[in-house]
Every structure is written in C-alpha cells, then in structure tokens.
Image: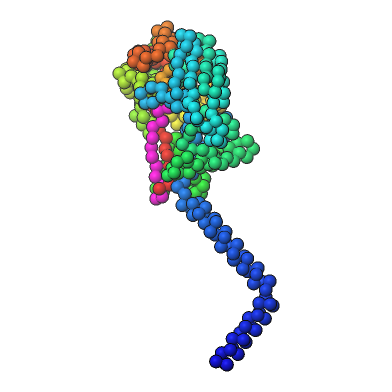
C-alpha cells in the first residue's frame, strides 16, 4: 500500500512538472483540435452535399450577355405571361386571363397575384417591360396590364410567351433560380441554377467562344453534356465508353434553297425552279436531317401533310434546264451560302452540274446576300405558324421578292383570325400554294446531337 502511494505521488509530480513546462503547447494543441472538430461537424453536411449533388454541367458554344441568353436557359428560371401548348392553344402562366378590346387593337391582361421574383420582391404589372414596335404598354395598377396596338392583330398574345427577366437575370415562378453568374469582360462564362424543389439537379452552364473550345472542354471533363449540329463532331465521341450520343431533329429550323424572283429566268417559269429541285438528289442529304415538305414544320398544329412532293429526276430536270442554261462560262447559276453550309452547297452544285448547269458557289461573310440567284440558308420558326415576315410581298424578310396576291391575303387573314380551326384551313391553303409556286425548296430539318457522359 505504502509503495502504491509513493508511486502515485511520483506520477503526480512528474505529470505536474510536465504540464507546467509544456502548458502553452498543450493548450494550443487542444484549441486546434477543438476547432478542427467544430469545423468538421459544421461543414460536413456541405462537403457531403457538394460531393453527392445531382449535377449537370452543360457546355454552350457562343458569346452571350444578359440581353441575349437562349430561351431554353431563360425558361429554366422564369416564365412568360402565356404559353403555347402542342395544340396551338394559349395557356396562361403569369397572367390569370386576358381579353381583346377595341376590335383587337388593345389587349388587357390580368396578372396573377402573390407572385414573387426569385429575389423575393413582389411581381407586379409595373415590372413588365416590353419594347414592341408600335405598341404602347400601360400598367393601370399592380395587376392590370394593357397593350395598345396601332392596328388589330389577333395573334399578338403569341408574342408574350418569352420568359420575363429583370436585371441581372432574375426570373419569376421558374423551376430554378440563378445561384451564381460569372461575367468576365461583360460576357457570361458561367451560370449556376439551383432547383426550387428537392430532387431536381443543379444545372451549371459553361460558355465557350467557339465550337472547338467547347469540344476541348468536353474532352477535358469541364462539362458533362454538350450539343452540336455537326455529325463529324458526334462521330469523334462515338467510341467513347463513358459517352452516349442522342440524335434529335431540330424542327425549329429548316434548310431551304431560296429562289430570287428578281432573276427573270427563275421568276418567269416555275418549271425552272421545279427542275432545279428535281435535279437535287435529296437522298444525299439524309445524314444532315429529316426531309422537309412544307414551309410549316410537322410539330405545328397547322402543318399540312398533303402538299405536292418533288422527287429526284435528273433526266427530266436536265431537259428543262438545258433550255435555259447553256454549259458555258457565261451562263451559270450562282449559289450563295454561308461557310457552315458548304458541304450541302457542294452536293447541290454537283447535282446541278450533272444536270447540265454550271454552278458557282459564293461564300457569304455572314450578312444576307445583296444579289443572288440561289440562296442556301436555314429558316427559323416560332411556335406560331404565322409566316407573314417571310412571304408577304411587303416584308423585308421576303428575301426572294416573291409576290402572290392570294398568299398575301392568306397571310393577312391567318394572323387576324382567332379561331384555330379557321386558321388551320388558311394555313393549309397557304402551304399548298407555296410548295407549288416554290419561292423556296424546303430541304430538311437539321439533326442535332446531344453528347453526354453516362
């Protein structure tokens, strides 16, 4: 017992002396350990969340600012006053209801109450700012918004489907909200979207100046998904074991061969235009997209499938074309297009020359051609079938200078008629005439390729 007491006292003296000599390092180590434990406990959920978050990193090619973001991104975090469904019906989103006034020269919208912007501030009619030409926008109070037009326009509400956004990219009633933006030198380089409901993935958009930089970013693992309209790019990743490629049809665009009606030969006899169409072997274009047959795409409720069809018939086409174009240096067709369309232009050139018409390709710098015979370019469509801008004889968008009194009347009636059933009849007649008259030869809806990691 006495030995045990002596041993205990000895250990006590040793311990006391050690603590007195090393008190400061011991206390410092204790505090550091305590701080480490607190830090781990506090931030562990965030670290776990960061490592386990359901996340998509999507690469986008092109330069964008706050003012020109693609609608597919805007629609993630905001909404428009209205939405057009697959049947062509207008569905209210931020608006409760609306009604035309003064014979269609004015539209009154009733804004939903209790809506808030993603920054938490109330959403009211006074926040809505549109810059339509010849349209006066009036907020009578927080929930009544009026649009005063100079002329009646039945389809005007269709223009109110674009998501409403206020600076800097604050949306309202969206599935997502913007959590982070990077804008070096005024150009957007990154947008991070956080879901408003649990279970949806975080979406990060990374922006790259060129397609090549986007492709390199995918190879380096900076993005997990990208979209391209170039099949040769998709082919690069075809054998990647951790990558899957989905081929889609972009029905919002259509590759079209436009004919200039200011050219006497092309305008005076539609048989010439039809012969050019029949000289083109469209089977060579199947890798570029889905064949088109009408100026209105098949996703539209107004699409008319029963239009005239043109098939490859080089012998007949050659006989007609040789009457008008001799195979000489001084008599040829000029095909104008952009660099991205050169491979398709080369196919058309080869087919026309096989039919006996010398063809020269003009590569445009990016603007519309001032003078052309044939112009190969993509048309872009909205959800509404109205094509007044492209084909009405008074419009700047009618680059072919096509004039047809009946088509003008159909286009005018189509945009000033409320009933969808009546509009469908109007656009059915319009499509049949346009395909027969052929101010443009509608080639295909381009493929797009979604490339993403499994």
Q: Farthest residue in the front direction? A: 1
Residue 448 lies, in percent from the top left, at 42, 35
Let me know if residue 53 appears in the view. yes
Residue 210 lies, in percent from the top left, at 54, 38
Q: Farthest residue in the left direction? A: 306
The foreground one among 172 and 273 is 172
What type of secondary structure mainly makes up the magenta span?
strand
Vertical relation: 360 (above or below) 271: below
Let me know if residue 355 appears in the view. no
Residue 438 lies, in percent from the top left, at 39, 15
Residue 126 lies, in percent from the top left, at 57, 23
Does residue 290 show up magenta in the picture?
no
Q: Is 136 left, or right, of 319 in this rendering? A: right
Q: Residue at horizontal 69%, vertical 78%?
A: 21
The image quadrant that residue 387 belongs to is top left
Q: Residue at horizontal 58%, vertical 62%?
A: 36
The foreground one among 216 and 41 is 41
Q: Is 16 left, or right, of 232 in this rendering? A: right
Q: Residue at horizontal 39%, vertical 45%?
A: 244
The foreground one among 70 and 339 is 70
Where is the N terminus found, in terms of image quarters?
A: bottom right
The foreground one among 186 and 110 is 110
Q: Farthest residue in the top direction? A: 405
Q: Residue at horizontal 54%, vertical 59%?
A: 40
Q: Which residues are magenta?
A: 241-253
Does residue 247 show up magenta in the picture?
yes
How many numbered dots are placed on residues in this image?
Answer: 0
Vertical relation: 294 (above or below) 241: above
**How was the colour assigned to the protein in this rendering?**
rainbow
């Amino acid at each position: 017992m006495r030995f045990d007491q002596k041993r205990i006292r000895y250990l006590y003296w040793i311990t006391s002396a050690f603590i007195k000599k090393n008190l400061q390092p011991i206390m410092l180590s204790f505090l550091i350990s305590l701080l480490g434990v607190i830090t781990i406990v506090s931030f562990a959920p965030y670290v776990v969340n960061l490592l386990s978050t359901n996340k998509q990193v999507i690469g986008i090619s092109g330069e964008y600012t706050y003012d020109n973001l693609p609608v597919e991104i805007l629609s993630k975090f905001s909404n428009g006053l209205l939405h057009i469904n697959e049947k062509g019906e207008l569905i209210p989103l931020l608006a409760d209801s609306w009604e035309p006034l003064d014979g269609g020269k004015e539209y009154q919208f009733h804004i939903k109450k209790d809506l808030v912007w993603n920054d938490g501030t109330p959403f009211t009619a006074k926040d809505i700012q549109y810059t339509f030409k010849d349209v006066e926008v009036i907020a009578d109070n927080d929930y009544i918004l009026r649009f005063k037009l100079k002329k009646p326009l039945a389809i005007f509400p269709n223009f109110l489907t674009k998501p409403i956004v206020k600076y800097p990219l604050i949306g309202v009633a969206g599935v997502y909200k913007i959590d982070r933006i990077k804008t070096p030198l005024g150009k957007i380089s990154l947008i991070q979207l956080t879901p408003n409901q649990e279970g949806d993935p975080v979406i990060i958009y990374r922006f790259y100046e060129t397609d090549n930089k986007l492709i390199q970013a995918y190879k380096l693992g900076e993005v997990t998904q990208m979209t391209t309209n170039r099949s040769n790019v998709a082919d690069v990743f075809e054998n990647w074991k951790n990558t899957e490629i989905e081929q889609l049809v972009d029905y919002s665009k259509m590759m079209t061969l436009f004919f200039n009606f200011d050219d006497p030969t092309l305008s005076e006899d539609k048989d010439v235009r039809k012969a050019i169409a029949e000289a083109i072997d469209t089977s060579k274009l199947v890798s570029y997209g889905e064949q088109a047959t009408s100026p209105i795409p098949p996703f539209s409720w107004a699409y008319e499938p029963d239009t005239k069809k043109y098939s490859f018939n080089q012998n007949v086409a050659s006989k007609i074309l040789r009457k008008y174009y001799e195979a000489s240096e001084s008599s040829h067709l000029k095909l104008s297009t952009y660099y991205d369309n050169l491979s398709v232009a080369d196919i058309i050139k080869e087919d026309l020359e096989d039919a006996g018409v010398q063809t020269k390709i003009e590569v445009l710098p990016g603007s519309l051609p001032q003078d052309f015979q044939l112009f190969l370019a993509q048309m872009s469509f909205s959800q509404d079938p109205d094509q007044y801008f492209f084909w009405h004889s008074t419009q700047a968008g009618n680059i072919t200078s096509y004039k047809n009194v009946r088509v003008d009347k159909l286009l005018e009636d189509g945009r000033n008629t409320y009933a969808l059933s009546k509009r469908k009849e109007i656009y059915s007649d319009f499509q049949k005439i346009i395909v027969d008259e052929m101010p443009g030869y509608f080639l295909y809806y381009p493929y797009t390729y979604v490339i993403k990691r499994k």
